[in-house]
Amino acid sequence: MGALLLAGALLSGAAEANKSDDKPATHKLELSPFRVELKWEATVEPAGVHPVKVSPKVWTELTVKEAAAHGQSVKKGDVLLQLEPEKIQQRIRDSEIGLDLARLDLELAKGDLEFAEKVSPLELATVERAYRVVQQDLERYLKVTQPFDIKTAQVNLKSAADYLAYAEEELKQLKKMYKADDLTEETEEIILKRAQDSVDRARHSLVGSEISTRTQLDLSIPRAEEQKREDEVRQRHVLVRSKAAQARELAKKRLAYERQQLQHQKTQESLAELKADAEGMVVRAPAAGVVYHGSFTQGQWSGTGGLSARLVPGGKLLAGDTVMSIVEPRPLLLRALAAEKEIRLIKTGAAASAIPTADPSVRLVLKALAVPAIPTGVDKFELRFQAEAAAGAEFLMPGMTCAVRMLAYEAKQALAAPSAAVFEEGGKPVVFVKTGKGHRVAAVTLGRSTGGRTEILGGVKAGDVLLLERPLE
């Protein structure tokens, strides 16, 4: 019997427990202080940074001879970096010799051009004169010499014919005369023989004249005319070619002179660049500050990135790289990245505090500088702070970190509920207030939220009990 009573009691207790577990979670509203505190990791950034680059125009062999150490304090004008100068000085000497050679080549090209410009007209005049001579020879030959040669050939042929006729007539008359006179037979034969010989010679001479005349008329005179005409055509082509060749030659010499001018100018410019690069072998501090090996981008230090290992005697540098930065460490500035939901809680000039990572016992009093309106990345807004009180923080240098805190909002007496107690109905915030018969829906006006708590400005009152879960209808 007692066992049955015990079992009944246990079942009754379990039922009561289940009934208790079915009750929804609630939160009772009470007036209490409400604070919104923002926290960031911040980096100390330089108040001023002066990048130090080695940017030669043409020289690429940048070997370190001596360099300022990381963390070294310098004054404006102090030597930061000295590069090995021997090879560039040797190149400068070679370039100076090259410039002298280029100047001599330029003078030669100029003299060659001036000589050609003066002599070319004379040479062309000689060719033109030779052409005029062959023109005159052809014209005179056709007008004077050729007609005279033809006439001479014809006259010579006629003279030979006449000579033969005269000789034949003389022989004929002698024969008549000897028949009528009393000359001896022997004398007569001698005279007749001589006369006959004259006739034979005249006849032979006539044949020769005919041959000579035909040769003159058919061969020599036409050939002479042809030769004269060919000479005229040849010399005309020589004149045309000479004019074109001289024009091309002068143009070529002018281009050669221009090229030498450009080469000389280029050599001068290269030498000037080398000399400027040689002066850049010694790099001086553009301002007073602390030497950092590496660069700063938006206040963030790149770290030495292996530069310290190259900024030693014999180390090799690359042209255009920022090898050092001269940092002005004061006034003390900090940079942090705020989330998008935080940025509207921050006002320019708002107070904040910071604790250095290196020494948590130090407290910095900060003032927010201009609050950015534009993000620097997705959900990232860059905040900058200036330390107004930093006693004992002399050790803080750019690149070190701090934890920054800012009290963005504070209400001495406020109603705040877990953010889970706020729901949405019809696009407006509501809460479910517990009543004796169940619950009621209350439209509320919300304030700020932080740490899972939301400030309620209106719609409910202290003492109201809110449901933390949406009730089942």
Image (spheres, rainbow, N blue to C red):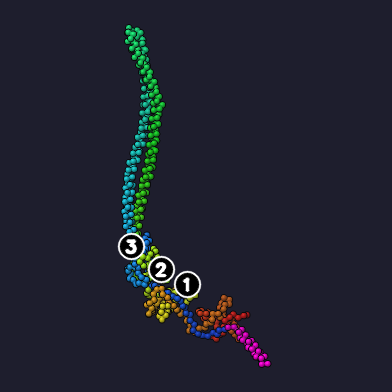
State which tag comes first along the sequence, 3 or 2: 3
- Quadrant (top left/top right/bottom left/bottom right) for the C terminus: bottom right
Q: Is residue 1 left or right of residue 233?
A: right
Whether residue 401 is visible to the viewer of this picture, yes or no, is yes
Query: How far across and down, in percent of the image, does residue 372 sit?
Result: 45, 72
Q: Circle 2 sits in a helix, a strand or a loop, which is it?
A: loop
Which residue lies under the disc numbered 3? 85
At 34% across and 37% down in the image, what residue appears? Answer: 129
The CA distance from mark 3 to mark 1 is 47 Å
The CA distance from mark 3 to mark 2 is 24 Å
Q: What segment is highlighted magenta in the picture?
A: 1-25
Residue 303 vertical placement versus 117 (above, below): below
At 34% across and 67% down in the image, what residue appears? Answer: 66
Query: How far across and down, in percent of the image, does residue 134 sit?
Result: 36, 34
Asked if the residue at tag 1 contacts the one at tag 3, i.e. Cβ–Cβ closer than 8 Å, the answer is no
Q: Circle 1 sits in a helix, a strand or a loop, which is it?
A: loop
Whether the magenta-drawn stretch holds residue 22 is answered as yes
> At label 2, which amino acid type do we have?
Gly
State which tag comes first along the sequence, 1 or 2: 2
> At label 1, which amino acid type do we have?
Lys
Whether the magenta-drawn stretch holds residue 82 is answered as no
Q: Residues within 10 Å of mark 3 (few under 14, many from 20)?
A: some
Nearest the viewer among 17 and 468 is 17
Indicate which disc residue 380 carries. Answer: 1
